[in-house]
Amino acid sequence: MSDGMVHNANNDLDREVTRCKVCGLVQYRTRTDNCRRCLRLLPPKVQFLIPPAAPQELPGDDRQLFENWPNNQTVENIGQRIRQLRESRGMTQSQLQARSRVSRSYLSRIESGQMTPSLGTLEKISEALGVGLNRFFLPESNGETILEDPFIQGLRPFLRQLDWEQWQSILRRLQVIGDHVAADSAVVPRPAREEKMPQYTRRAGGQSANAHR
């Protein structure tokens, strides 16, 4: 088959097959939209509409995390959480930039709530920090706050070396300290009237006498 015949065959495959309502001739649609036999107008072209793709649902609880995303409050909270997680690990923005491969200026704007991060950017940052995406959206608990404190983070390498008895000893001492602090901070009722304490003077003979009689 020659190149010209192949070209014509491809053109025929791309053209619409239609039927003239006047003379009934089945034919390829012409460029002028006129029937090849009776030269009447052919039926209008059939438009094939492709339905839009269904929105991709995120697996598990992440579907709820990204509902109504984004809004200003969510963006600001995400920036604060990223900064807290970064500082709790003793990381600078430059170090996080090197690990996540997200530009430092972009990180700075995300942490300040001035920029809306994409899902791909959040995935890079979460991998660099070693946390899941949910840590950027869910409020932190009290225990999580303690564990992410920079002071506790610095002690963790040493705390891992303690055995069970040493842990129990430390917890008992902390309990005693906590009890003392609670007792000192308690409000002690003050007496309504202060009694004047008697003052004593010592006489020449070594005997004490009340100075106020």
Image (cartoon, grey):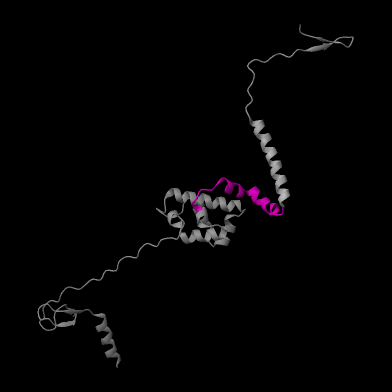
Q: Residue at x 69, y 44 (%)?
A: 171
> Which residue does the image show at 29% across and 93% down from the upper left?
2
User: What main secondary structure does the magenta stretch of the protein show?
Assistant: helix
The residue positioned 72% from the left and 45% from the top of the image is 169
Vertical side of 142 occupied by 212: above or below: above
Q: Which quadrant of the figure contains the N terminus? A: bottom left
Name the side, left or right, on which 48 lies relative to 158: left
Q: What segment is highlighted magenta in the picture?
A: 136-162
Q: Which residue is drawn at 57% across and 61% down?
A: 99
Q: Quadrant of the C terminus?
A: top right
Q: Is residue 209 left or right of residue 133?
A: right
Confirm whether residue 7 shows in the render. yes
Is residue 32 placed above or below 180 in the rendered structure? below
In-image side of 112 versus 30 (left or right): right
Q: Which of 33 and 43 is in front in this view?
A: 43
Residue sitting nearer the eye, 184 or 45: 184
- Per the image, is 155 magenta? yes
Q: Is residue 5 above or below residue 174?
A: below
Residue 102 visible to the viewer: no
Horizontal placement of 8 versus 127: left or right?
A: left
Q: Is 63 covered by the magenta stretch?
A: no
Q: Position of residue 110 (x, y in %)?
A: 49, 53
Q: Position of residue 208 (x, y in %)?
A: 84, 11
Counting from the top left corner in percent of width and height, residue 13 is at: 26, 82
Identify which residue, 101 or 85, lies in the foreground. Answer: 85
Determine the image quadrant of residue 23.
Answer: bottom left
Name, please, the residue furthest toward the bottom. 1
| Count of numbered marks | 0
For the view shown, which residue lies furthest in the right direction?
205
